[in-house]
Amino acid sequence: MARSLVAIARGSDDKFQLLEEAAEKAGFWPHLEAAHEKSGKSREAFSIAIKPNLMILLTPKVPVIATDPLLVEHLIGLIRRRGFTNLKVVEAQNTMGNWVRNRTVANVARVAGYTGKGYEIVDLTLEMVPHTYRVKGMPVWKNFVGRSWRDADYRIDFAKFKSQPDNRYTLNLKNEFGTLPVQNKYMEYHTRLPYWACTMYTLDNFRVSFGFIDAFTGSDGAAGFAVQYRPKKPKIVMASSDILALDLTGASLMSVDPWESPLPRFVMMNWGEPEIEVVGDATPLDDWEPVPEEIHNMVDIGQSIYVISNVGAAAGIIELDTKEFPPRLAFMRIYYYVMNWIFLTLYGRRRPKRDRERFHNVVRLGKARS
């Protein structure tokens, strides 16, 4: 059995250098060129879709919970230099849209800092079409897919390094759940069918060509997937053509057992556990805070009950930017204000002003460079 190569670039204060190093060590460029040659298409026609982690973003004050748009756009710039111009950044809407307005992919991307220069921002929810999913050993599933993801010649998964209560962590595999296009995800992809089964369908039907992990900053703890007050700074970027191997290596850096996480366990039961060859420093982080067991168990059960999970999504909206994403119910502004104050007080981790302003400074710098 061939070993799956995972590259880890680590330690530099220059995140763009780390991205380039990880891509080089993982063999990204030869892999891309081989896929292009096999397609028989021109470089201009060869379609590349990049799926970052984006739609959980609720405020630009907490950018650490989503893939850094500057890293994504740097990768796009590198790809364009090689003559590939048919590039799309894709995402789908999620359950947050049940409770707050302006949650189209285009608007959340704008708030996050994506410019759309040299690529198209695509909302998979707005272009979804019926699709029949087939996976060996699983029932046929009739659902939907976004055309840009379905039709891409080359798919890139660019995940964020963070924890998540229902799956213990979220990296490349869980990032693919976000390609499923129905907006009310808690109803369609949690209650009607377990999220790990839905994700397995899209993983197997629309294979990812290459994966990256933005671990330059990370978000841990019970609510690290959406809330963060003291972001970790691993200064790491990872890459591999095998997103399962990449996912498992990322879990190892967090000291999390992937066999105890529902999604990677189910994927490994279907695909098998890969043999992994790591290039780079794979020393686990010594300050990573895992999801407490009781939180994991509670969320894992609650998400399968629609009313609980949907209301839970509303309750979990902390530090909401109500100007960019106004609540659908006016009185919820007061609720979010009070809950945010309570959460910050009880958590005891109010971020310093420099952390609150960091994202705005990064975005301004990026615009100045473009």
Image (cartoon, rainbow, N blue to C red):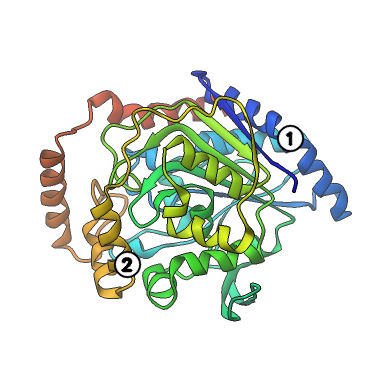
How crowded pointer 1 is (Cα within 10 Å; few <14, some 14-19, many 20+) is rated as: some
State whether residue 116 appears in this view: no
**Nearer to us in this view, 130 or 325:** 130
For label 1, the residue is: 27
Of the residues under marks 2 and 1, which one precedes in the sequence?
1
Residue in the image at 35% along x and 34% along y: 288
Residue type at tag 1: Gly
Alpha carbons under labels 2 and 1: distance apart: 38 Å
Residue in the image at 40% along x and 35% along y: 218
Where is 234 relative to 306, above or below?
above
Q: Is residue 10 left or right of residue 165?
A: right
Residue type at tag 2: Gln
**Nearer to us in this view, 109 or 4:** 4
**Nearer to us in this view, 174 or 328:** 174
For label 2, the residue is: 303
SS under mark 1: loop
Q: How many marks?
A: 2
Where is 7 relative to 145, above or below?
above
The percent coordinates of residue 188 (x first, y second) are 43, 74
The percent coordinates of residue 112 (x first, y second) are 42, 43
